[in-house]
Amino acid sequence: MVLDIRELSLAGALELTPRQFPDDRGVFLETYRFEGIEEAIGHRFEIAQANVSVSRKGVVRGIHYADVPPGQAKYVSCAHGALLDYIVDIRVGSPTFGQWESVLLDDVDRRAVYIPEGFGHCFVALADETVATYMVSAVFNAPREHGINPLDPEIGLVFPPEAGELLLSPKDTDAPGLTEALDRGLLPTLEQITAFHAALAAG
């Protein structure tokens, strides 16, 4: 197996660590392999769009998510630099609603994370010129994209001191907190996500 797949504490989210093959020329690795991932998630992961962001140290991007269906599953890795990636369970009715887990993504271990539809996603760059790559299951659709303030104390993301001074966009700081998003009916439900994934598994 070229990818070591570990299930995270939030059901459906995965950490993927590639096997690296170094030699005197450099290193080779497979960053994505569909069979193991699709076996782990129980359905096909259709890649509809690929994105790249370049961030200075301290930049925070997120918490972002999309309406389901179709939502937007993400496969995120770090091509250069380092970032701490946060996966947030925002599925109403989930036993882990409001909880989060973080994974260090960098250009040393070259891990990736798979984030299912219905989860919030955020990261903070830990080095200048950090390059994050995202393969996503649906194209960007602005009216269906939403955010939650990454500084919301109810969620309580912990940003490491090595990130330094945090830099956030007005879009992210103006986003509602978790409770406000819940009260406004902006969050996906566990029932919606379960039904959507069942439909994907059925083909």
Image (tube, rainbow, N blue to C red):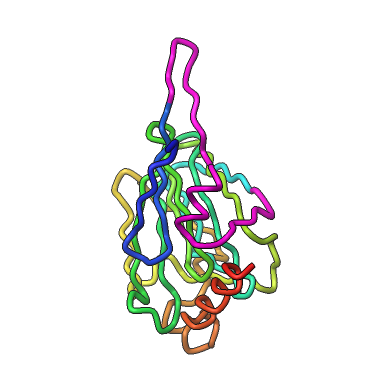
When the figure is inspected, residue 112 is found, relative to residue 143, above or below; the finding is above
Q: Quadrant of residue 151?
A: bottom left
User: Which residue, as the protein is rendered here, is positioned at the far front?
Assistant: 202
| 154 is higher (above) or lower (below) than 53 | below
Q: Quadrant of the C terminus?
A: bottom right
Residue 127 visible (yes or no): no
Q: Nearer the viewer, residue 100 or 37?
A: 37
Up/down of 141 relative to 68, above or below = above
Q: Tell me what residue is drawn at x 41 percent, y 52 percent.
A: 85
Quadrant of the rendered structure where residue 93 is? bottom left
Tell me the quarter of the picture where residue 96 sits: bottom left
Residue 49 belongs to magenta span: yes
Q: Position of residue 132 (x, y in %)?
A: 53, 44
- Quadrant for the N terminus, please: top left
Residues shaded magenta = 21-50
Can see residue 103?
yes
Q: Is residue 1 above or below residue 203?
A: above
Residue 29 placement, left or right of 135: left
- Which residue is drawn at the image coordinates 69% and 68% (left, top)? 142
User: In the visual, does 161 lie left or right of 80?
Assistant: left
Q: Is residue 150 magenta?
A: no
196 relative to 152 in the view: left or right: right
